Amino acid sequence: EYIKTWRPRYFLLKNDGTFIGYKERPQDLEQRESPLNNFSVAQCQLMKTERPRPNTFIIRCLQWTTVIERTFHVETPEEREEWTTAIQTVADGLKRQEEETMDFRSGSPGESSGAEEMEVSLAKPKHRVTMNEFEYLKLLGKGTFGKVILVKEKATGRYYAMKILKKEVIVAKVGAGPGRGHAGRGRGHA
């Protein structure tokens, strides 16, 4: 979806991260329930720019398994600051609430032996990394189970390939697999 011309829109930002756009300000519940745009600012990146117009800002975020960018233009730098501050405040609040984490193991598989990894994991508490700790750069590939995205860790500047899996596809494929039948059978025996 790409629109070459700028069109005025009315947007609502909710505390749950929902960012809803309309052609014009909704006057009643029926209009409010049929938005033109609907996405989340959770785990988004905000960029301010003066191109293609002054007072522009771009929101880059993850929509399901796709990185999307939305470009917005406002009349004044103050208005842009209000929007970006509000969006960042909501995104930061969601980050604090985030329960979904990923296991993190520093380094790469070739850097150490299994024994060294064992020593490291016993010496240091396990660090949990969230998706917010990465900048999403480029879609590398798509598959049945999800997508792979090139990311850069914000803290270190290291690049990684992040695989984002579709839970419903995994549940459907694995849940109907050959192990499904006997997994429930073992519960009743002593």
Image (cartoon, rainbow, N blue to C red):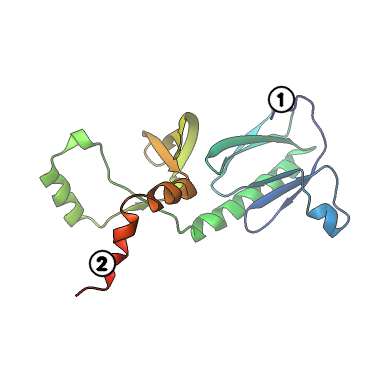
Q: Please rate how many residues cluster around mark 2, counting C-alpha atoms within 10 Å: few if below 14, some from 14 to 19, many from 20.
A: few
Q: Locate residue 143, reporting x and y percent.
A: 45, 33
Residue 87 lies, with reference to residue 93, above or below; the image says above
Q: Nearer the viewer, residue 58 or 149?
A: 149
Location of the N terminus (image quadrant): top right
Mark drawn on residue 186 = 2
Disc 2 versus disc 1: nearer the observer: 2
Q: Locate residue 124, reporting x and y percent.
A: 22, 55
Residue type (three-letter) at the residue carrying disc 1: Pro
The secondary element bearing badge 2 is classed as helix
Kindly identify which residue carries mark 1.
52
Residue sitting at x 80%, y 37% = 75
The secondary element bearing badge 1 is classed as loop
Residue 78 in the figure: left or right of residue 122 = right
Location of the C terminus (image quadrant): bottom left
Mark drawn on residue 22 = none
Q: Locate residue 164, reporting x and y percent.
A: 44, 42
